[in-house]
């Protein structure tokens, strides 16, 4: 989800539709067993209302995150499992599926929490919730390529993601 504010149409909210997403992280120890550094990537297939681009229907929009951050266990550790907090800084890349619209990259951050259950010494089940804040800081064109068909205003884009997956140690 998330939304932009359409500066051309009485500040109408343009909601991003939720869609399928995948994510992957590479975690490595940072000090004791309860803290880890993390390289995190996520990609979501979303859509924006076509009216924002002067079209009928919806326009595909891929939203990708690449963040460097960390994970800190509140109780337990990466081997035994437990609850943890997670966060990172990086970039968000917006890629619209529309001819003539350019991709945009903006700074972003994420914060979240999760729980990990050890299934075997090198295998765990993870459930996690993350919130993303992307600094859009725009009062004009967005997705412009030789001309702007999409004009927004606003400082941030907020999104959230719920994830369930496997963690494999090596």
Image: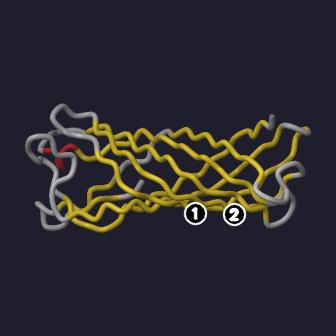
* 124 or 46, nearer to the observer: 124
Dot 1 falls on a residue whose secondary structure is strand
Going from the N terminus, do you reach mark 1 or mark 2 first?
Answer: 2
> How busy is the neighbourhood of tag 1: few (under 14 within 10 Å), some, or many (20 plus)?
some
The quarter in which the N terminus is drawn is: bottom left
Residue 95, labelled with which disc? none
Question: Residue 107 vs residue 80: left or right?
Answer: left
Dot 2 falls on a residue whose secondary structure is strand
Mark 1 vs 2: CB contact within 8 A: yes
> How busy is the neighbourhood of tag 2: few (under 14 within 10 Å), some, or many (20 plus)?
some
Seen in the picture, residue 121 relative to 75 is either above or below; the reply is above
Q: Mark 2 points at which residue?
A: 85
**Residue at horizontal 49%, vertical 39%?**
20
Question: Residue 118 vs residue 67: left or right?
Answer: right
On the image, the x and y values in percent for residue 35 come to 77, 59
**Quadrant of the image occupied by residue 26:** top right
Residue 111, labelled with which disc? 1
On the image, the x and y values in percent for residue 76 come to 87, 60
């Amino acid at each position: 989800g998330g939304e932009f504010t359409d500066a051309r149409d009485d500040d109408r909210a343009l909601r991003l539709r939720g869609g399928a997403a995948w994510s992957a992280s590479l975690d490595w120890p940072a000090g004791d067993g309860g803290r880890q550094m993390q390289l995190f990537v996520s990609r979501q297939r979303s859509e924006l209302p076509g009216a924002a681009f002067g079209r009928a229907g919806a326009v595909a929009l891929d939203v990708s995150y690449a963040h460097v951050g960390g994970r800190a266990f509140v109780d337990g550790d990466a081997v035994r499992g437990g609850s943890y907090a997670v966060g990172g800084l990086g970039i968000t890349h917006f890629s619209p599926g529309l001819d003539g619209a350019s991709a945009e990259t903006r700074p972003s951050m994420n914060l979240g929490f999760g729980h990990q259950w050890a299934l075997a010494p090198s295998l765990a089940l993870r459930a996690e919730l993350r919130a993303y804040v992307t600094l859009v800081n725009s009062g004009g064109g967005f997705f412009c390529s030789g001309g702007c068909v999409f004009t927004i205003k606003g400082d941030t884009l907020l999104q959230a993601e719920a994830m369930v997956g496997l963690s494999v140690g090596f």
